[in-house]
Amino acid sequence: MTTVTRCWLSLVPVRVRRGTAWPDKPVVLHHSATGAIVEYDPERACLETATMLTRVGLRMRGYTLGEILLEDHDPQLTALYGACSRLHLDVEHTTGPRITEPTVVNREGDWA
């Protein structure tokens, strides 16, 4: 049974920016007045890793990721991450042929 409290209902916007994280952490999550800020070192962690660790870190604190706002990234990638985060979807970068039709993968329990 999950107890729904006020913090479970609050959607937190997250700003993700490239930078240099601490020597022992490639991804650092900071809290701000308007949401959360994530800095990641692109040489030590990819964008997917940074956003997934952010999602998990916020969830462990009782918050739900509301929207991912990328800073200093490609505008199309920024729009994709923003739209997917509002729909509670993960973005996975792959190599190989382009996917021309959307695919939905059901991972029960990920959002429960």
Image (tube, helix red, strand yellow):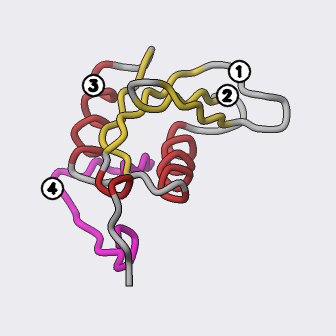
Q: Residue at x 84, y 30 (%)?
A: 23
What residue sits right under mark 2 in the picture? 41
Q: Calculate the distance from the C-alpha at mark 3 to the C-alpha at mark 4.
A: 18 Å
Of residues 100 and 40, which is closer to you in this image?
40
Q: Position of residue 98 (x, y in %)?
A: 28, 47
Judge whether residue 19 is colored magenta: no
Verify whether residue 96 appears in magenta. yes
Residue type at the position of mark 2 = Asp
Q: Which residue is mark 4?
A: 101
- Looking at the image, is mark 4 or mark 1 earlier in the sequence? 1
Picture quarter with the N terminus = bottom left
Boundaries of the magenta span: 90-112
Q: CA distance from mark 3 to mark 1?
A: 24 Å
Question: N-terminal of the two: label 3 or label 1?
Answer: 1
Q: Rate crowding at label 2 as few (under 14), some (14 to 19) or many (20 or more) other CA atoms within 10 Å.
A: many
Disc 1 versus disc 2: distance between alpha carbons? 5 Å
Identified at 43% across, 50% down, the residue is: 94
For mark 3, give the secondary structure.
Answer: helix
Verify CB contact (< 8 Å) between mark 1 and mark 2: yes
The numbered mark, 1 or 2, whose residue comes first in the sequence reads 1
Residue at 23% from the left image edge and 66% from the top image edge: 104
Q: Earlier in the sequence, mark 3 or mark 2?
A: 2
| Mark 3 to mark 2 CA distance (whole Å) | 21 Å
Q: Which residue is mark 1?
A: 20
* Relative horizontal placement of residue 86, taking residue 56 as reference (left or right): left
Q: How many marks?
A: 4
Q: CA distance from mark 4 to mark 1?
A: 36 Å
